[in-house]
Image: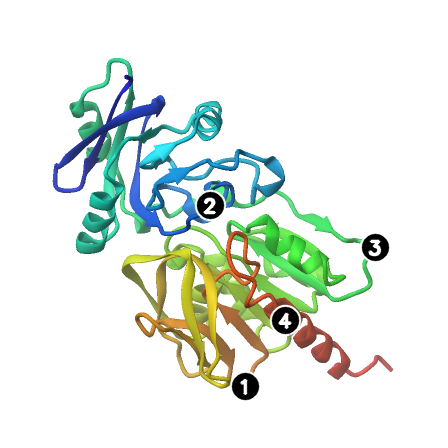
Amino acid sequence: MTAAYVALEGGHVIEGRGRASGTARGELVFTTAYSGYEESLTDPSYEEQVLTFSYPLIGNYGVREERFESDRVHPRAVLARELTEDVAEWLESEGVPALDHLDTREVVIDIRDGGAMKCGIAVGEDVTPEDALEELEACKGMSEHTEIGEQVSVDDAVVHGEDNDGETVALVDCGAKGSIVSSLLERNATIHVIPHDSTVAEVEAIDPDVLFISNGPGDPANFEQAIALVEAFVEDTPVAGICLGQQVVARALGGSTEKMDFGHRGVNQPVLDLESKQVLMTTQNHGYTVAEPGEHLEVSQINVNDDTPEGLDGVEYDILTRQYHPEANPGPQDSLSFFDDVLAMGEQSARAVPADD
């Protein structure tokens, strides 16, 4: 059996079975999702994290590239009770350390009690607990990853749906999942996926009907240019956001964000819509949340479990954001109408602009 060790913040070391060799460090988090492991592992929001699956068997329906949300695996390492050969081989080919035969219940309890924490991983024929502890010692906190946007964003603008005749969306890529693009394409939009640090002039050249801030990893305070874009366009252009995007929009409009103890990650997070009183089941993956929305935003949806903001609407501006993932990959499809609402907001705004003389 290949040796494998996880060193937790505080110095406790857990031993497991190695499935993909290597060393790694990152913030240890868990997901409650019982399916959708391909989507989770390719979600850019897991950048610089070590992902623990609480569901005991991961890989029972193989690995299919068409389910991927990006072009690579983003967690720095993977922990599970049992990984199938398909998933273990995939992670090995991606250079992502993986280990199983762990009591993941113990790991999840540690995270719930102590919060998401730094950890070190060492997997290989000759590794020792000290190797994992060395990785832990070198691990940075999530807010210290100030350049994390560069790790997950496109380098150059990419256009999808050029021949579509619907609304034009400038999607600021802070780590966007592929299914956000496909959800907009299905609604006949033209999507300009632009780098997270795009300038105001570059967005003006697109002349979008909607400025859309994507999901992404890490602390929203580190996405300064995305915040600046919202500040620059919010008075004249409808603004939408998903996950990190909601946090960016709040910060841009005078609100504040904070780190959560262990975050929301899974496909069964209940969200209450305050107007309709309907409860939606949602897919989520975030470790930060909006603490105060500020005077320009109002909370429209809350998490049933802890009352954190799950949806924000603009008070005087056209703004619509969601903390969860309405594109629902993986997860329930209760909230897909969000994309219809966003594009309708863009269409109405475009109609309201007077024609040139």
Q: Which residue is mark 1?
A: 316
At label 2, the amino acid type is Ser
Where residue 67 sits: x, y (%)? 59, 42
Q: Which residue is mark 2?
A: 40
At label 1, the amino acid type is Glu
Between residue 148 and residue 122, name the one nearer to us: 122
Report crowding for label 1: few under 14, some 14 to 19, many 20 or more residues within 10 A (C-alpha).
Answer: few
Which badge, 1 or 4, is on the more N-terminal residue? Answer: 1
Q: Which residue is mark 3?
A: 163
Q: Which residue is mark 4?
A: 342
Residue found at x 87% / y 82%: 357
CA gap between label 1 and label 4 equals 16 Å
Callout 1: SS: loop
Callout 4: SS: helix
At label 3, the amino acid type is Asp
Q: Nearer the viewer, mark 1 or mark 4?
A: 4
CA gap between label 3 and label 1 equals 33 Å
Callout 3: SS: loop
